[in-house]
Image: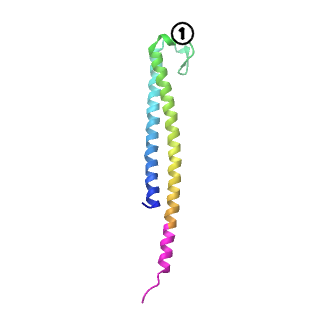
Amino acid sequence: MSLRDYLHEKAEESRHNETIGYLIAIIGSIFMIGGILETLIAVEKPHSWFLFFPYNSEKFMGDPYSLLGLSLDLVGLVLLALGIILCVHYALERAWYMNELRKTQSAEEEKMFKRKRKKPKIK
């Protein structure tokens, strides 16, 4: 396997991993929206919540739907952040592989051009 083939395979792998990162971010946003909706529907007094974090703990522990909403929110937030971080990481990695692939391609073309020039023509 040549260096060019290796870099091409790694760029494809990074593209695949970037797609997985996008999917993780989408799943995180779905969980987060579900948790926010669960919180809005289940909680009787929304003024005892700051965004989706409870600050009135005695009522929070008595309601299992509030705990479900909070856990969905937290899992969604973590997945969303993780997905965005993975997307950025693999996009930068793919850009590096593509840059190295361009360098390798130009070096191979120069090498082929030099070989063509060195061949003596037989007449």
Residue 23: quadrant of the picture: top left
In the rendered image, residue 15, in percent from the top left (x then y), is placed at 45, 48
Query: Closer to the camera, 40 or 75?
Result: 75
The amino acid type of the residue labelled 1 equals Glu
Residue 8 vs 40, above or below: the answer is below
In the rendered image, residue 34, in percent from the top left (x then y), is placed at 44, 25
Residue 106 vs 31, above or below: the answer is below
Q: Residue at x 49, y 25 (%)?
A: 73
Q: Is residue 118 magenta?
A: yes
Q: Which residue is mark 1?
A: 58
Magenta-highlighted residues: 108-123
Which residue is the extreme one toward the front?
1
Which residue is the extreme one toward the bottom?
123
Callout 1 secondary element: helix
Residue 27 vs 115, above or below: the answer is above
Q: Is residue 62 magenta?
A: no
Q: Residue at x 44, y 49 (%)?
A: 13
Residue 44 vs 87, above or below: the answer is above
The colour scheme of the drawn protein is rainbow
In the rendered image, residue 103, in percent from the top left (x then y), is placed at 53, 62
Q: Residue at x 51, y 75 (%)?
A: 114
In the rendered image, residue 118, in percent from the top left (x then y), is placed at 50, 80
Q: Main secondary structure of the magenta part?
A: helix
Query: Closer to the camera, 35 or 82?
Result: 82
- What is the quadrant of the N terminus in the image? bottom left
Q: Residue at x 47, y 72 (%)?
A: 112
- What is the quadrant of the C terminus in the image? bottom left
